[in-house]
Amino acid sequence: MITMQKLGIGAVQFIVAIFSGYCFYTSSKGLYRPWHSYTLLSLLTLNILLSISIMELVAGATYWGLALPFWYYSLFGLKKGFIFSAVVILLSAVVILIRTDTNIFMPFRTVFNFTLVYCSIWLVCHIYEVQNQKTSKFLRSLALQDGLTDLQNRHALKADFRAFHNSFDCLHMLIIDIDHFKNINDKYGHDIGDSVLINVANVLKECVQGKEIYRLGGEEFVVLYIDISDMEAYTKAEEIRIAIEKSVFYSHKEDIKLTVSIGVSSLHPDHEFADFLRAADQKLYQAKHEGRNKVCS
């Protein structure tokens, strides 16, 4: 016999089905919003808890609750997945214990078995998500880091530009190019050339207070400065040029002295990344045209 309680469960299930279709449609159209996941999982959780409280235990409604940790961790990540999973196991245990339609021993046995299996699945999901986050972090570092110098790479530069462009009005880019670097590779070999690039990167780390240092490719490096004036950007570029000029880079045969040319550009409101980079590049070409070992802004 269908009761009002079971009709209520059916209504919730109908809403879940309709909203699931809505979420699928919005995701396929690129209109997904975070609240979609929260609403869908809240409805699913409510449906499962109602089923556990109303349906007969032998009907197996409790089994659906075992899938919740997987959904929580998949959609919400480590921290929120842990919190939601903990809340649901407590609510499920309370709902089963307060049932009055079974003998005194049945709920405790059900709670024990349900909790044991639920916690096992919860543990597996938690361990998997921990490893998944570690792997994602490692892969992200590989994707955004230059393998030779351990500086950030061009992809990281683009990502940081987008973040800074939306947050700061004043942004300066320095493009630093090692003068006559091809001659170093030709004379000493590529191993020494790589060593020189690493040492230049180390000098940049000493000169720049921050992590906004990037290897653009080859012998070109980029530094971003936030919220400084044009004069300050020029002064910092000069400090970098002088520091590299004063440094001595060693090879097995002789000491290597380097100079760099630096182009400085400031961000304009209508600049995209390519425009910003092109402006600094033009200043770099000007520095090289004027004899190298110069800063042009």
Image: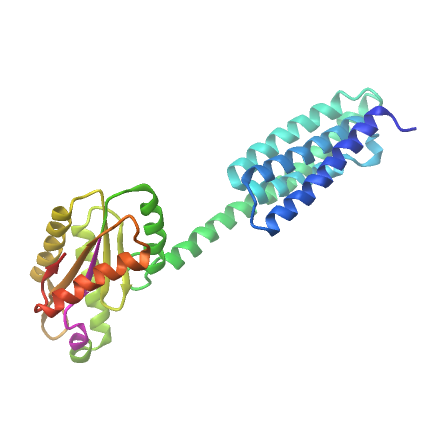
Residue lying at 84% horizontally and 35% vertically, measured from the top left: 59
Magenta stretch: includes residue 39: no
Which of the two residues, 251 or 261, is positioned nearer the viewer here? 261
Q: Residue furthest right?
A: 1
Q: Name the spot of residue 266 as percent of width and height, x first.
A: 21, 51
The figure's colour scheme reads rainbow
Residue projecting furthest to the front = 270
Residue 188 against residue 103 in the figure, above or below: below
Q: Is residue 69 left or right of residue 6?
A: left
Residue 17 x %, y % = 73, 41
Answer with left or right where residue 190 lies relative to residue 155.
left
Residue pictured at 13% horizontal, 50% vertical: 236
Q: Quadrant of residue 297?
A: bottom left
Q: Would residue 153 be visible to someone looking at this image? A: no
Residue 279: image x %, image y %? 23, 59
Question: Is the residue 200 above or below the residue 22 in the image?
Answer: below
Q: Quadrant of residue 40?
A: top right
What is the number of callouts on the image? Answer: 0
Q: Position of residue 134 (x, y in %)?
A: 46, 49
Q: Is residue 172 visible?
A: yes
Residue at left offset 15%, top offset 60%: 262
Name the foreground residue: 114 vs 149. Answer: 149
Q: Quadrant of the N terminus?
A: top right
Q: Magenta part of the protein: which range?
A: 173-184
Frontmost residue, 223 versus 250: 223
